[in-house]
């Protein structure tokens, strides 16, 4: 079974930007169905101009992709606006890269680091998400009320604290293994690149 999901990619009109963004989408497991370009993709309320946002909305209606990928870090309000207009999940560049790291994390330490980065990504956006939740239900945030949002924020802080402790334990464990290898006379090798 193919786990590749279809995507509309919104990026800058330069060849390098298109190639890099397409490669990131592919690495995250998305097949880019359509590429939409615009010179500025962070300034308006949709991240792209209103006319371009309506074009994307029509593309979503016609092709029914799984997701929209923005090749830029969006404000939560921009992400909310385009997701609400198109009625589809929207990933910004930072979230896309976190997804790639999550798929490729192989050690316990790297898995913890990725989870910590994901929680920090959410923490930065929590205030805007709460504000948007008060305006109406935000896709992906379940329309949390003030009390629920405070609980969610506290939960994020506790999870971050717990992950930091786990990460510290993993670092100490790795350091102990390194010391043991050095004591046993095993040669040390460094790989760069």
Image: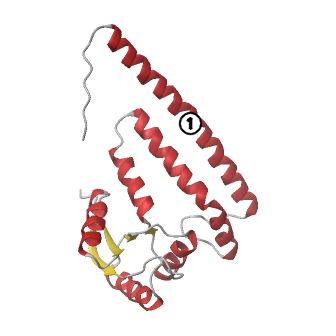
Give the residue furthest to the right. 147
Q: Position of residue 73 (x, y in %)?
A: 46, 66
Residue 60 in the figure: left or right of residue 14: right
**In which quadrant of the rendered view does residue 62 lie?**
bottom left
Residue occupying the point 47% across, 89% down: 50
Q: Quadrant of the N terminus?
A: bottom left
Q: Nearer the viewer, residue 6 or 191?
A: 191
Q: How many marks?
A: 1
Q: Position of residue 104 (x, y in %)?
A: 33, 45
**In which quadrant of the rendered view does residue 9 lie?**
bottom left
Q: Position of residue 89 (x, y in %)?
A: 45, 70
Visible in this render: residue 5? no
Q: Quadrant of the C terminus?
A: top left
Q: Position of residue 59 (x, y in %)?
A: 35, 84
Visible in this render: residue 77? yes
Residue 98 vertical position relative to residue 34 in the rendered view, above or below: above
Residue 128 in the figure: left or right of residue 15: right
Residue occupying the point 62% across, 72% down: 137
């Amino acid at each position: 079974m193919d786990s590749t999901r279809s995507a509309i990619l919104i990026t800058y009109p330069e060849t390098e930007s298109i190639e890099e963004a397409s490669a990131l989408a592919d690495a995250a497991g998305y097949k880019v169905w359509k590429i939409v370009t615009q010179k500025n993709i962070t300034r308006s309320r949709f991240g792209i101009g209103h006319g371009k946002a309506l074009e994307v909305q029509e593309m979503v209606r016609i092709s029914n992709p799984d997701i929209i990928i923005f090749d830029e870090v969006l404000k939560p309000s921009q992400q909310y606006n385009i997701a609400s207009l198109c009625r589809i999940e929207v990933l910004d560049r930072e979230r896309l890269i976190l997804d790639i790291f999550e798929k490729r994390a192989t050690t316990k330490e790297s898995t913890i680091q990725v989870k910590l980065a994901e929680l920090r990504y959410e923490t930065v956006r929590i205030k805007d998400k709460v504000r948007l939740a008060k305006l109406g239900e935000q896709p992906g945030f379940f329309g949390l009320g003030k009390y629920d949002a405070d609980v969610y924020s506290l939960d994020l802080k506790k999870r971050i604290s717990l992950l930091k402790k786990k990460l510290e334990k993993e670092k100490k464990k790795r350091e102990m293994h390194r010391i043991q290898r050095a004591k046993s006379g095993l040669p040390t090798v460094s790989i760069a690149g």
